[in-house]
Image (tube, rainbow, N blue to C red):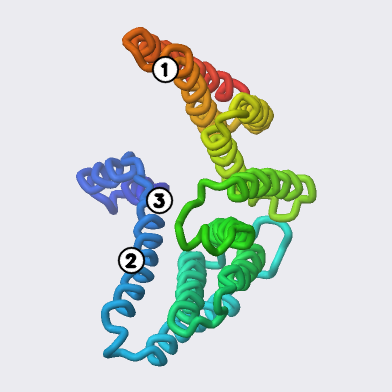
Amino acid sequence: MNTNVFDQLHSEGFISGDSYEKIQLQRNKALVSVHWEIKTLLYLGILLFSAGLGTLVYKNIDSIGHQITLLFIALVCTGCCYYCFKNKLPFSTGKVVAPNSFFDYVLILACCTFLTFIAYLQFQYNLFGNRYGLAIFFPMLLLFFYAYYFDHAGVLSMAIVNLAAWVGITITPLQVLTSNDFNTSPVIFTGIALGIFLMIIAWATRKMSIKDHFEFTYANFGTHILLISLLAALFHFEILNIIWFLSLVISSYFLYRKAVLNSSFYFVLVIAFYVYIGTSYVVLNFLDRLSGFNEGSLYAAFFYFIISGIVLALFLIRCNKKLKETC
């Protein structure tokens, strides 16, 4: 608040002392930001609208009719896309800010309704037959295009999720999908390859300066997918679990160095979490093979979790302090 004019009016006698004191009190009050609260409410509103639309379709499909439902979803999606294309700023390989406060949410709604439209066509009319990969591939391409064209990290996250689903369905036999048994070697190896691929894309995004602010999104998904897949391999391949544990440690070390280089405590925390799970599994598995879970091994496991928990906490505190000093 610019109060210079009020100071002048008070000095000239146009504002009383009481009124001037109230203005001073108002000026000294710190403003409270509600930016993230409003964004959360808007995103929640889009999520509730999409969920409500799906519930409405599910419970009233017989009375509403398939064609009318599809038309309504298509109209909502088309209207949102028209608004986004009309109001977008020119494309750039750098960061492009949204033209207004509601642009991002309209774009998210357009993508959600488009996915609902494709899913409805596949479920009701079996548009792609048993080729489930195609039902994900085409929406994935559109989501990647929208993410870069409109510069939206949220849409990019949706595209990466579709990429993971498409890759998983493409390499997975149909019987695995129908039996919901994803604890198989092809799925694990695909997850490892996808995690490495996303990390390479994150590096290339920064190196080539093409939407380099997307690096975090790619690295975030890549880190989680890679380390989860390595943990799954550690649990699944019991004979060669020491090899997979070493793979987990080596991968985590390189990811940790990158996190320290970027001063990212978030990635340090994530990496430490996955390594701790893998280490705990190896220790407990060793105790079980050594003497079975008798009273002695239970005490050893109990002390392990106490000591390792303290060491992990001290490590994270030290890393947090070190990263703050380098910032």
Identify the disc placed on residue 120. Answer: none
In this picture, is 230 found above or below 53?
above
Q: Residue 38, how many percent across, how many down?
A: 37, 57
Q: Mark 3 belongs to which amino acid? A: Trp
Give residue 72's quadrant in the image: bottom left
Q: Is residue 150 visible?
A: no
Q: Please name whichever residue, 198 or 110, is drawn nearer the observer in this view of the structure.
A: 198
Q: CA distance from mark 3 to mark 2?
A: 18 Å
Q: CA distance from mark 1 to mark 2?
A: 39 Å
Q: Residues within 10 Å of mark 2 (few under 14, many from 20)?
A: few
Residue matched to label 2: 48
Classify mark 2: helix, strand or loop. helix
Residue matched to label 3: 36
Residue matched to label 1: 309
Q: Residue 178, how many percent across, how many down?
A: 47, 63
Tell me the mark number nearer the camera, choosing from 1 and 3. 1
Q: Residue 272, how many percent across, how many down?
A: 53, 27
In this picture, is 267 found above or below 13?
above
Q: Please name whichever residue, 92 or 308, is drawn nearer the observer in this view of the structure.
A: 308
Q: Mark 2 belongs to which amino acid? A: Leu
For the C terminus, the image quarter is top right
At horizontal 20% and vertical 44% (from top left) the residue drawn is 18
In this picture, is 108 found above or below 234?
below
Q: Please name whichever residue, 11 or 169, is drawn nearer the observer in this view of the structure.
A: 169
- Count of residue discs: 3
